[in-house]
Image: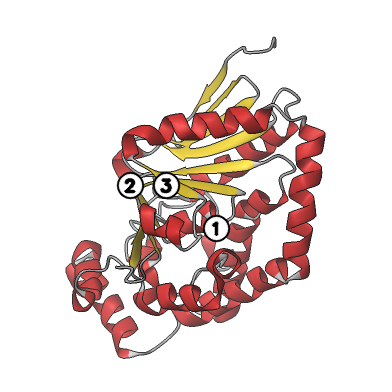
Amino acid sequence: MTHGAKWLKTSETLRFEVRDRVAWITLNRPDKRNTLNAPMLREIHDALLEADDLAEVNVIVLQGEGRDFCAGYDLTGSYGGGKDAEPDFDAERYRTRSGTIDNDCWHLERQQALTAILLDLHKPLICKVQGYCLAGGTDLALSCDLVMAADDAKIGFPAARANGTPPTNMWLYHVGPQWSKRMLFTGDTLMGRDAARIGLVLDSWPADQLDEAVAEMARRISNVDAEILSAHKRAINVQMELMGAKTAMRLTAELDARAHLAQGPRRVQFRKDVAELGLKQALKNRDEPFGNSIVSLNARG
């Protein structure tokens, strides 16, 4: 492949493109708000490794097709009260996701192994966030090196209200303990411009300027040799590991599994609503007591 050449791979869940030293990995389920399912998670993992391996790539951009980056995990399966596709093996011989903390934790760790690759890549990774970046979407975005958002993007973990705690919990490393707790205690959502003000994202731009801003940042970074970029990145990431980031990820997966078995009234009601009323109404009932869930920053300056 010559410099500036274009290479494109497309699947049902992902698009992979390389041009001018930048690999563009695009979540490609726009009709589902790019929600994550098992095939997409595997393809994200493989695409990230492919980009990290390609000699002509110096920087990677992770983005979502359409109006959203990623609205979280696809809840139409068993997690959301629906039914998973019939497996092509004898499922009774293997762990189910529900029933015990250890089974749930095992499945969360296997899922986490796919997304943890974000922290292990040698090459810089930019996340472009427009529209919704919720729940599992934040697990992806906050594991990237730089997060660039639209002013009107909506970033948060509303599942913290009744479903569990983030299994890949990188909030603390971006905004410190108080803002991390404030966001998870309420499940509220930050607009992109306010996420930039508190340091959750690098900066924000008007939605119609975001593509250009991300492309320019990727271009600038790509002018540095991959080996030098890797040295910079790994110096910072090793310090995060010394702060406990990788160990904390194991603990948060276990805490998420524990939260899934919680028997508090809101958790119990959510499960009941899913079974009797369906996922859409269950989410509406879960969020209704919180009213307007957009965080309003009062500090001036």
Q: Residues within 10 Å of mark 3 (few under 14, many from 20)?
A: many
The mark nearer the N terminus, 3 or 1, is: 1
What's under tag 3, amino acid-wise? Ser
Residue found at the very far front of the displayed protein: 301
What's under tag 2, amino acid-wise? Gly
Residue picked out by circle 2: 131
Q: Nearer the viewer, residue 230 or 217?
A: 217
> What is the number of the mark on residue 298?
none
Q: Nearer the viewer, residue 231 or 94?
A: 231
Are discs 1 and 2 less than 8 Å apart at CB? no
Closer to viewer: mark 3 or mark 1: 3
Establish if 109 lies above or below 114. Answer: below
Q: Quadrant of the N terminus?
A: top right
- The picture places residue 150, in percent across and down from the top left corner, at 37, 44
| Picture quadrant where residue 27 is located | top left
Establish if 100 lies above or below 144. Answer: below
Q: How is the image coloured?
A: secondary structure
Q: Is residue 163 visible?
A: no
Q: CA distance from mark 3 to mark 2?
A: 12 Å
- Element type where label 1 sits in the image: loop
Closer to viewer: mark 3 or mark 2: 3
Q: CA distance from mark 1 to mark 2?
A: 40 Å
What's under tag 1, amino acid-wise? Asp
Are discs 3 and 1 less than 8 Å apart at CB? no
Q: CA distance from mark 3 to mark 1?
A: 49 Å
Residue picked out by circle 1: 90
Give me the residue at 54% from left, 56% from top.
142
